[in-house]
Amino acid sequence: MARRERDRKPDRESVVDPTDGRVLERNYDYAQKNVRLLSMWYDCEPKRMLELLAEHDIELSRNDERQFGTYYRTVKRHANG
């Protein structure tokens, strides 16, 4: 390993933003596309999690769509409108 790489301090860009669209989508997949489980991971209410998913245009699973679809679509319309 080159000396520069070994002595280099971690830069701020290596910090992951959990609300970034790609990170959020990946975490939703890891949570088996379950809004309630993901909201526990993020330590927030399911309502807030739905808002984040809608803002990033992340499609809900069929189960989440049945439970939260109306609210999700409302938030999505406002985010895109």
Image: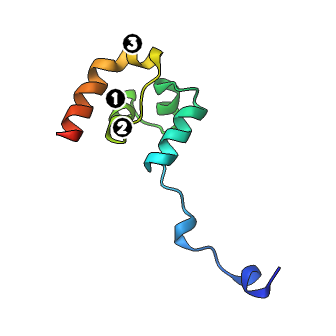
Q: Residues within 10 Å of mark 2 (few under 14, many from 20)?
A: some
Q: What residue is disc 2 on?
A: 57
The image shows residue 40, relative to residue 17, as above or below, that is above
Q: Is residue 14 left or right of residue 47?
A: right
Q: Residue at the location (53% across, 68% down)? A: 13
Q: CA distance from mark 3 to mark 2?
A: 17 Å
Disc nearer the start of the sequence (3/1): 1
Q: What residue is disc 3 on?
A: 66
Q: CA distance from mark 3 to mark 1?
A: 14 Å
Q: Residue 64 at what x, y percent from top left?
A: 43, 19
SS category of the residue bearing label 2: loop
Q: Residue 15 at what x, y percent from top left?
A: 54, 62
SS category of the residue bearing label 1: helix
Q: Quadrant of residue 5?
A: bottom right
The image shows residue 78, relative to residue 65, as above or below, that is below
- Residue type at mark 2: give it: Asp
- Residue type at mark 3: give it: Arg
Q: What residue is disc 1 on?
A: 47
Disc nearer the start of the sequence (3/2): 2
